[in-house]
Image (cartoon, rainbow, N blue to C red):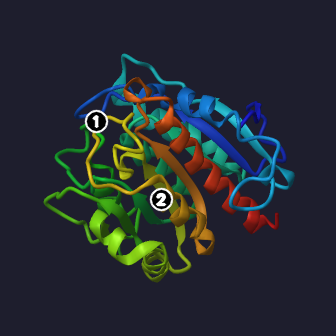
Amino acid sequence: MRRRLTRNLAGVDVAVWGIPFDAAVSNRPGARFGPQAVRRASAIMEGDPQYPFHADPFANLAVIDYGDCALDFGMHGETPQRIQAQAKPILDAGVTLLSIGGDHFVTWPLLKAHAEKHGPLALVQFDAHQDTWFDADERIDHGSFVARAVRAGVIVPETSIQIGIRTHAPDTCGLDIVYGDDVARLGVDGVLARIQERVGDAKAYVSFDIDCLDPAFAPGTGTPVAGGLSSREALMILSGLEFLDIVGGDVVEVAPAYDHADITSIAGAAVIQRLLGILARKKGG
C-alpha cells in the first residue's frame, strides 16, 4: 500500500513483512513470489478512505513495509529458525506483525515467535485444509503447522477455530471446524458468532491461506480446492473480527504464476487491508 520501506521500528504500530519461501509445498510451487505480487496489487490501496471502514487506516496507524525475510535457498532446514529469529526484534519492539507468504509452513515459526512474546495463542485459520498432518519435527511441509503448534503448546485448541475447511485429515487436534458448506449454511453473522464464542477474549493470531477462497476467486495458489468461500464472504467475515484481540496475522499461499489478471494477489492484498482496517479502528481511527 505504498508504505515506507524501512527497518526502523521507532513509533511504528504495524510492520508488513514478506516471507518468500515455498520449498514446503506438496503440489504447485510459486508462493515465494507471493509477497511481491501482493505488494503490487496493494499499490492502489493508498491515500483514500478505505471500504468498508470509511476511514484512511494510515491516518492514525503507523504502518511500514519491513521488506522480506532473509533466507538461504540452499539451507531449508534453517528456515524456521531464521523466520522466528528475524520476527523476534519486530515483536519485541511492540509492533504488530502482518506477514505475507510464502507457503503455509511459514506460519509455524511465526506462531512460535508470537507465543514467545504473548504466551499460547488462539488460532483463527481460514483455509481449505486442516494442516494437522504430522510425521516428524524435522519435516519441512506446509500441511502440519497446526499439529506442531498444538503439540508444542503454542496454540490453545480449545480457543482455536478453522474456517472454510474442505478436506479431511486424520486428526482435528481439538480445533473447532467450520467446513466450507457450513459457511454457506451459517452465513457471515453465524460464522462470526461461532468465532466469537470459540475465541472469546484470548489473544488471537489470524492466518489466512488464500485457498480458503474458491478457485474462481483465487486460482493462483498451490493447492486449490473447489467449493470455497467467495471473496465477499471472506472479506465480510474478516471485517467483522473487531471483537478479537489480534496480536498478529498472515496471508499465505498466493502463487502468482497460476493467477489470472492478478485476482488472487488482489484478494491477498484485501486480506491484509481488512486486518489493517481492524487494527486502525481498534486504535481509535
47 and 154: which is toward the camera:
47
Q: Which of marks 1 and 2 precedes in the sequence?
A: 1
Q: Please say whether residue 176 is visible from this viewpoint.
A: no
Quarter of the figure that contains the N terminus: top right
126 and 201: which is toward the camera:
126
Left or right, residue 222 beside residue 62: left
Residue 192 vs 197, above or below: the answer is above
Q: In which quarter of the image is residue 24?
A: top left
Residue 208 vs 119, above or below: the answer is above
Which residue occupies 85% across, 55% down? 60
Provide residue 31's location: percent of width, then percent of height.
41, 30
Q: Please say whether residue 125 is visible from this viewpoint.
A: yes
Going by the numbered disc 1, the residue's amino acid type is Ile
Quarter of the figure that contains the C terminus: bottom right
Going by the numbered disc 2, the residue's amino acid type is Ala
Provide residue 247's location: percent of width, then percent of height.
60, 60
Provide residue 36's location: percent of width, then percent of height.
56, 26
Tag 1 secondary structure: loop
Which residue occupies 69% across, 33% down? 43
Q: In which quarter of the image is residue 42?
A: top right
According to the image, label 1 marks what residue?
Answer: 140
According to the image, label 2 marks what residue?
Answer: 234
Badge 2 density bin: few <14, some 14–19, many ≥20, Cα 10 Å: many
Which residue occupies 23% across, 66% down? 172
Q: Are marks 2 and 1 in contact (CB under 8 Å)?
A: no
Residue 222 vs 171, above or below: the answer is above
Disc tally is 2
Badge 1 density bin: few <14, some 14–19, many ≥20, Cα 10 Å: some
Tag 2 secondary structure: helix
Which residue occupies 62% across, 56% down? 275
